[in-house]
Image (cartoon, rainbow, N blue to C red):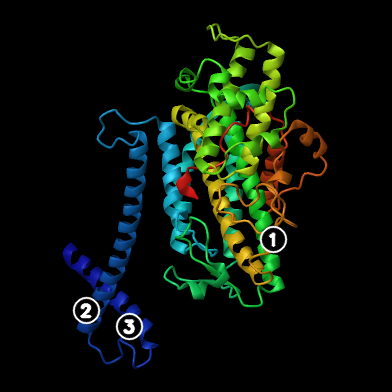
Amino acid sequence: MVRAVEQEQESKKLTSMILDFKGSNDNKDEGDNGLNSNVSIEEMVAAFQAREKQLLNGKFHIFIFKLDKMDQMKEKFAKLLLGEDMSGGGTGVSSALALSNAITNLAASVFGEQSRLEPMSTERKARWRKEMAWLLSVTDHIVELVPSHQKNKDGSDMEIMVTKQRNDLLMNIPALRTLDRMLIDGLDTFKDQTEFYYLSKDASDSEKGNNKREDDKWWLPTVKVPPDGLSEAARKNLQVQRECVTQVLKAAMAINAQLLSEMEIPESYIESLPKNGRASLGDSIYKSITDEFFDPDQFLSSMDLSSEHKILDLKNRIEASIVIWKRKMHQKDSKSWGSGVSMEKRELFEERVEIILHLIKHRFPGLPQSSLDISKIEYNKDVGQAVLESYSRILESLAHTVMSRIEDVIRADLLTQDPPESNPTKDDSRPNSVHGGDDSESTNAQTLSDLLTWTTDQNDNEDQTEPQLETPKENNDQKHLTKLNMLINKKISYLESLGGLRSPTSRH
């Protein structure tokens, strides 16, 4: 009896579902594959089962996709936990370095193909946002205890300690996300543009014309513009984007330099230093710096800076001498370093080499990381600092890349207006960056000389005139960029801003 009732209920349920299915298909055209009023119950049952199977397959594929995404995330975090040693042998690097390497490698794989001034593909954008969200989620759990108040049921107040995301992460992560969004949105403005285009790598010299690349970046495509040059609207957009990217570059450099300055100098680096500044600099450089009359510009002009390797070598020597003299003056190292130089003279010499260091960073912002920078990143144990340093470094690298692509288009446009012989534009791919030196091309756009404050005197004079970052349309971005300006305008000594002006060479 009970079984008969259950069968009757199942029959009614199936009949109701079939009638619903039939009714939904009665409105379809005759050419459709839907059922008509002449089909049999058996055919409707078969069609219903086929449709149900199709829906189940769709849900199964969605489930498999989510499962695959979760497996990817598990694999990535497992690699981070094991310090990149998937064998589990205990020979992995620290969690901080593993996370830093993960962000750097992700940026290299996503942005390494940005050889043209065009928007990123949808797939690359989605991958970047998804995997960066995974890696940045670690910082949500880096917290500190802060005092707070709790109201009890009886109305009394009680002071308690609550957790809050660490202050440097709370301020810098949203700011870096804003810079990230500004760069990607800036590339999107070149979508569907028809003012310029790129030649293939196999194009003949006659096709390239005056735009033929004369630098060592032969793999980059050649830009072509109309014979009469770009339109005024296109030039204005390029100029706006150039200034915006310059401000992003400025902010990323400032954050990165500040983070590197806060990292502790590893003992392994200190142990590798010579015993005095003279041994680090060399006799000829030391003699020039300790001369009674010292001109930093004249000093740099007398140095051989013909290659990136020589510039980086000079930077490494200067940073090492600064660390040596700082330790002698402020830490009063008990070791016998053997120096007959007075404290006053040592302070004077230190100021001079700091000026030289900042001039080098100003003129050659595209340099690879120095030995001090690499050592700090390698031995850093603070996961929060590692995330901020690597994120700001890859944003700086991307900004540098986008700036180079913009400069390529501007250079091609200028070649249509002036003969190549009289064109003063400088190739941005050389060691001194697009904003370096005495480039006469930088007319309206702000240069790094305007943007980066090299001395405390300049900081004092420019407090009222420092340009503010152009914020995106979102109101919440204004708060983060206002904090950025506060960070950028903060007065720090040259020692505090050692290194960090660029990501590894392969990024550019």
Q: Position of residue 299 (x, y in %)?
A: 66, 34
Measuring 68% from the left and 59% from the top, which residue is drawn there?
Answer: 424
Looking at the rendered image, the disc whose residue lies closer to the viewer, 2 or 3, is 2
The foreground one among 273 and 508 is 273
Task: Indicate left or right for 465 with 88 as reference.
Answer: right
Q: Amino acid at mark 3?
A: Lys
Q: Earlier in the sequence, mark 1 or mark 2?
A: 2
Q: Amino acid at mark 2?
A: Ala
Q: Amino acid at mark 1?
A: Val
| Disc 2 to disc 3, C-alpha distance | 12 Å
- In the rendering, at what x and y percent does residue 96 appear? 44, 32
Answer left or right for 305 relative to 418: left
Q: State which mark lies toward you, 1 or 2.
A: 1
Disc 1: CA contacts within 10 A as few (<14), some (14-19) or many (>=20): some
| Mark 2, residue position | 46
Disc 3, SS: helix
Mark 1 or mark 3, which has the lower sequence index?
A: 3
| 10 Å crowding of disc 3: few (<14), some (14-19), many (20+) | many
Q: Which of the numbered marks, if any, corresponds to residue 305?
A: none
Disc sitting over residue 22 in the figure: 3
- Quarter of the image where one finds residue 443: bottom right
Q: Which residue is mark 1?
A: 240
Q: Residue at x 52, y 46 (%)?
A: 394
Label 1 SS: helix
Q: Where does the image place residue 208, in percent across and percent down from the top left?
A: 52, 72
Distance Cα–Cα, label 1 vs label 2 = 63 Å
Task: Confirm whether residue 337 shows in the render.
Answer: yes
